[in-house]
Amino acid sequence: MRRAAPVSIAARSAVLGRHLALLSSIAITLLSSCAIALVATSCGPASTPTVVPTHVLADTPQDATRIAGALDDAAPTGRLPADLRPTHYALSLRIVPEEDRFSGEVDIDVTLASPRHVLWLHAQDMHAQTATITPEGGESIALDVERAGDDGLATLRPASDVPAGRATIHIAYDAPFDRTLKGLYRVDSAGFSYAFTQFEAISARFAFPCFDEPAFKTPFDITLTVKREHAAISNTIAVQETDAGDGMKRIRYATTLALPTYLLAFAVGPLDVVEAPAIAPNGVRTRALPFRGVAAHGRGAELAYALEKTPQLLAELETYFGTEYPYDKLDIIAVPDFASGAMENAGAITFREWLLLLNAQSAPEEQRRAFAGVMAHELAHQWFGNLVTMPWWDDIWLNEAFATWMGNRVVMRTNPEYQVSIAQLGSIEGAMSQDSLVSARRIRQPIASNHDIRNAFDGITYSKGGGVLAMFERFVGPEKFQAGIRAYLAAHRFGNATADDLLAALTTAAGSDVSTPFRTFLEQPGVPLVEASVSCVGNAATLTVKQSRYLPVGSTGDRAQRWQIPLCVRFGSGGAAREQCTLVTEPEQQIALEGSACPTWLMPNADAAGYYRFALAPADLEKLRRAGMTQLLPREKLALADSLVAAFASNTLPASDVLAALAPLANDPARSVATTPMALVNFTYDQVADAALRPRVEGYARRLYAAQYRRLGWGPRASVSEDGETKLLRESVIIFLATTGRDRAVRAEATRRALAYLGANDDAPLNDAAVSSELVDVVLSIAMEDGDAALFDRLERRLRGSTDAMIRGRMLGALGGARNPELGDRALRLALDPALRVNEVLSTVGGQMSIPERRDAVWTWIQAHYEPLSARIATTRAADLPWYMSRFCDATHAASLEAYFTPRIAALPGGPRNLAGALEAIRLCGARLDAQGPNLRTFFAAQRP
Ligand SMILES: [Zn+2]
């Protein structure tokens, strides 16, 4: 699954997010939580918030408790018992999206290791019409089906004991289409109804009775009965279509390879299905691969860009793995309303529309990059996760960390101009911020409940996991690492494998122990802090390193933690740069530096490849700043900036020193480096400065980027084509000058362009020529920030009149930024407006929370509308609400959130850990404010307005 960026927040946070990472709790949100949807995952489990029909197949929970009283009948609380295994499913569904319910029949072949008088499987909110089990060669035995608890477990009680051996469970049932983007759900868009699926992590149980755990991989035979005029997509190619009477047709699909339930997929409705040329054979794959794009009615033409670019990404993966794409066809499907960014269903990958429907001429740079990154990620899953699957959710990192790492690796090759290695570092640094919390998960976190399944789709799993893999790839060497990966895939193809299997394969390929050091990152939380100092006696140089857990000021965590860190340093010696690597295993360790002279400078994290922060002795830091900056790679400059800001956050370096060190970077030619000073200034403006101080912060901000703005302006001179990095730097600089700098000229120009973009006539097409596509949402937001009701009306009308996810996102982003209290309240009310797609519901809430003066009003509104809001967004997203509120920065608000959410969130999947994390982030922000606020005030009081 891919955490992704809906347009509204993505465009701004993609620019600002990484720079805020250390400083603002909301950035932790952006990088960690489904909530703010930059990284929205559909995030698995959710009990339905909709009304359960009274005829649902269920006893009361009290009955379930009573039944569970008998010891050997006790319903399993964790995984299903392993002595009953499915071996094959025949699943037939009748799907008419215009209706409220669907119906199905499933025959599950199972093997029983011993006789049973009670069975369990997963079936949630279904009405069972008939249920039987037929032992091989025996008579059918009727089954009583009862609900067991709230997580979708069902108890099957046969009328007589079922003997050991093979048997077939048959259940005919009907169930409601979900309306909150999980299970088999209905979407209404532009006057048409569709049905789509999202089963990961544990929502297949809403669509059909099943053994809904990833260890149970079986072949599936799928049959869909749909309206004759509808298209129907599943995981494999259709092999037979017959008339089913009554305006319906029946489509039978080829038997799947062994799959877990969470990777099945269906899409039904008046879809545009675009046949692309089959993907040609290559050195790895000898067959041509059927390839199609699927989109909502009328949108098929917009798939052209994705269809053109996908084959190259697939070929890169096949080359790396040395094995062909495993499935019989590839469909890429743009879904009009989708909870996460994308989902890697075997052979039928689903995406948010924004990621797949691109205009080749006018797509903003962020959208092109997001397409490539997410497509590569989902395609990588066809091997990591689909071909080889984790047996249980504690190893979901084997899917997500790998797809993150591999997806980046692929795009680095296909699109070097995207500078993915820089973006990757940004997300790793974001994960480090999250990992600094005491409440942080481990990459491989034990699963104690369904809460942990939901929480597992976070920045730790994706970005820390991907970063740790990249670190060990560099440590082992890319060729050996690749050999280990290939061996692992070959050994477990079509089956399941664990972390142990992977680490064993890497150790074998490396010829040395990878497993032990790797586990120190995998199985404990936290970011290592490496404190480094250099001493020289004559020409003999010694590097002393100490390791501990990095903790921000105010943290209650324990620093005494130890890792085995692949530490690589670069340093200047004898006029050249040298690199030296050591596995640091001790709390304190001395390393003799090679070379013939005392280093003129030393970078403690060569190429920023290590998952650790560092602190240098003052003299060494000064050497690095003076002699080393010209020697550092862009990634190393970023790591240095991150470590400086981390020192600010841990109160080991005064803010004024950090600002002084970062300021010169504002004019660095590399975008990623040039934007590093913004975060601390934004933090000051947002959390520290009062009305008297703000003009001085604004003045400082304007002067900091005046030169960049003069150079970049609002666009290239005519006929000059620009690279994407320049476009994105311009976007960052304009946002910074307009918001933190309050630059009047920039704001006026933004408003002028926004009005030109909207045009004089609200029924005419938007004027794309008025402003470059990267800046559309920026200028709209700036215009609306100070705009009046008339502008609000115009933006809202455009929102309601469009089914284009990009335009809707732009309008919602701007509406959410309204500063006027009455208009801000209107923006909040949009969250409950049925015109919003489910995945848009929290857009304006996030926007309003970004405005300091509006935060209390948002919090009051959330408390007043919690019930209808949480019903609309499903329990999974409701569980993320604390993260939305984590822009607060004081103990009083933390206490208020805690009192309100604690009783409400305990039952929501993943809720308790989200609340703990948000509260911790808010309290740490307050501690940072107490510790560094005076220094920041003094620094900015000395600046000119
Ligand atoms: Zn994924």
Image (tube, rainbow, N blue to C red):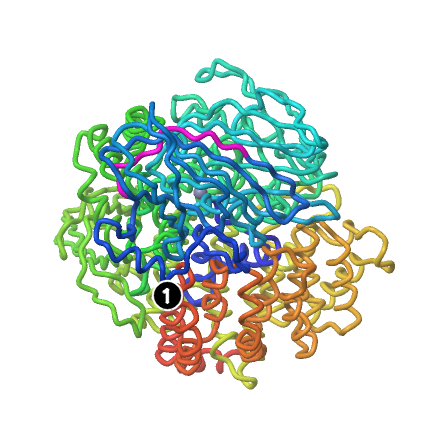
Q: Is residue 490 above or below residue 924?
A: above
What main secondary structure does the magenta stretch of the protein show? strand
Residue placed furthest toward the top: 286
Dot 1: what SS? helix
Residue 82 included in the magenta stretch of the image? yes
- Which residue is depicted at the point 48% across and 49% down? 3
Residue 600: percent from the left, percent from the top? 27, 52
Residue closest to the eye, 242 or 920:
242
- Which residue is depicted at the point 52% across and 58% down? 54
Q: Is residue 426 above or below residue 362?
A: below
Specify the segment rendered in magenta.
81-92
Residue 657 included in the magenta stretch of the image? no
Residue 396 shows in this picture: no
Query: Where ligand 1 lies, by image quadrant?
Result: top left
Quarter location, residue 800: bottom right
Quarter location, residue 141: top left
Residue 115: percent from the left, percent from the top? 24, 36
Mark 1 surroundings within 10 Å by alpha-carbon count, few (fewer than 14), some (14 through 19), many (20 or more): many
Residue closest to the eye, 335 or 810:
335
Q: Which residue is mark 1?
A: 912
Residue placed furthest toward the bottom: 692
Q: Amino acid at mark 1?
A: Pro
Q: Is residue 595 above or below residue 762?
A: above
